[in-house]
Amino acid sequence: MKKLIYLLVSLMIISIIVINCMPSFALANAKDNLIVEEKEKFKVFVGCLENMNNVEKKLIKEDRKSLIKKITSDKNSINVLISFNKFTDADELNSILDKYSSEIVINSIWFSIPGKDGRAMKKVENNDIQKSITAFFTEAKIDNKDNELLELEEKYGIFAIELNCNSNITEKLMSENIINHIDTYYYPEVEKLALENEKYVSYISLPEKPDGTG
Amino acid sequence: MKKKYMSLILVATFVLISFNIATAATRDTSGFPNWYTPYDGQVSIGPTYVEGRNLKWSQWRIDYYDSNDYWELEFRPRTGEPDDVWDGVDSLYSNLPGAYEEYDEDDVTVGTYSPDKLVSGTSYYGMVYMDWNSNSTDPFFIVESEKGLWLGVDGWPERYEYITTYLSKGSSTYW
């Protein structure tokens, strides 16, 4: 009887340890998909949720949200990469961002043909999304005569945006329905490793697309 | 006792060798184009862009890739850095799955996060457009095809090979 009680207690302790450690393992596993060490640098893929299961995606989203909340309380403003849960257009995006317009700077936007691999990114000037997209096609047509560019122009949907804003805005943006994932260009654990190994960190934007294509 | 120490030394040596192998990048100097490189392609450098076009992988090449791999086309100035030539990235345009660009002190890169999702025979392209630099220099560039592996911060061997070692602005080469 005594042995059985010992066995049950041991099993309970092991279960508690496993249950408590699981999220940490899953989170660490998810982050493994985002970080690469090279000879002189660490690469970090910001906004990326590729190769993750739903649990890992949820954990990484929460982890990044809490980090953003933490660092925006210390800093005046940060750059955030926001991916959407659907393709959208400049008008809808403006209607969402207009209420924050005096307090945000839009750095760039990502767009693609829904249902197809590939993507385009364009730097945004003066917070004018539509003008920047128009400039992209004007400039790209000088060097590209292919049909895919024409198809992109006709069918594109915006799926992500990078902007600079303060803590107050990031908090509000997190509650917008259209937002899938919000990330920032700062991974403290990688920064620490880079410092210890005398390397630098290269942050690469790879926002998630809403249709599951690459 | 001696045996125990010997085993420990052997294990330690194995770990050290493995670690060194794991953090070393391997340049392939023969067999171009090796399996991770498109069998066909063209690379160009324009006044304000770098690009890869008509990049094609056959099925057996794609089959070697798995979901932990990435592939990059890197344009590295032989002297100086990209900031001597351009003034940062303006835009990216690519049909590669999980396409991304990287502009840092070493090179300008267009890559795919998911080379295992490439489709054989498809003509892929990746273009990175930069802002004009009025004090631009005109170095020669090394263009590399590189394959790497995500495995967290432990590092892993990368393989790369040169596509060309002397590509200048306004020129292109194909294979």
Image (tube, helix red, strand yellow):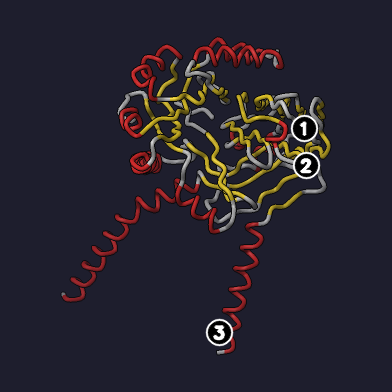
Q: Amino acid at mark 1?
A: Thr
Q: Residues within 10 Å of mark 3 (few under 14, many from 20)?
A: few
Q: Residues within 10 Å of mark 1 (few under 14, many from 20)?
A: some
For discs 1 and 2, the disc positioned in front in the rendered view: 1
**Rendered residue at 70%/13% (across/down):** A142
Looking at this rendering, what residue extends furthest in the bottom direction? B1
Residue B37 in sight here? yes
Query: In whole angstroms, how far apart are the C-alphas of marks 3 and 2?
Result: 52 Å
Looking at this rendering, what residue extends furthest in the front direction? B135
Q: Is residue B141 left or right of residue A51?
A: right
Q: Does label 3 or label 1 sit earlier along the sequence?
A: 3
Q: Tell me the quarter of the picture where residue B143 sits.
A: top right
Quarter of the rendering occupied by the C terminus of chain A: top right
Q: Nearer the viewer, residue A175 or B126?
A: A175
SS type, badge 2: loop
Identify residue for label 1.
B137
- Circle 1 chain: B
**Where residue B125 is drawn, which disc sits there?**
none
* Labels 3 & 2 near each other (Cβ < 8 A): no
Q: Amino acid at mark 2?
A: Thr
Identify residue for label 3.
B4
Q: Amino acid at mark 3?
A: Lys
* Residue A115 percent coordinates (x, y): 51, 21
**Where residue B79 is drawn, which disc sits there?**
2
**Rendered residue at 46%/37% (across/down):** A49
- Circle 3 chain: B
Query: In whole angstroms, how far apart are the C-alphas of marks 3 and 1?
Result: 61 Å
* Labels 1 & 2 near each other (Cβ < 8 A): yes
Q: Residues within 10 Å of mark 2 (few under 14, many from 20)?
A: few
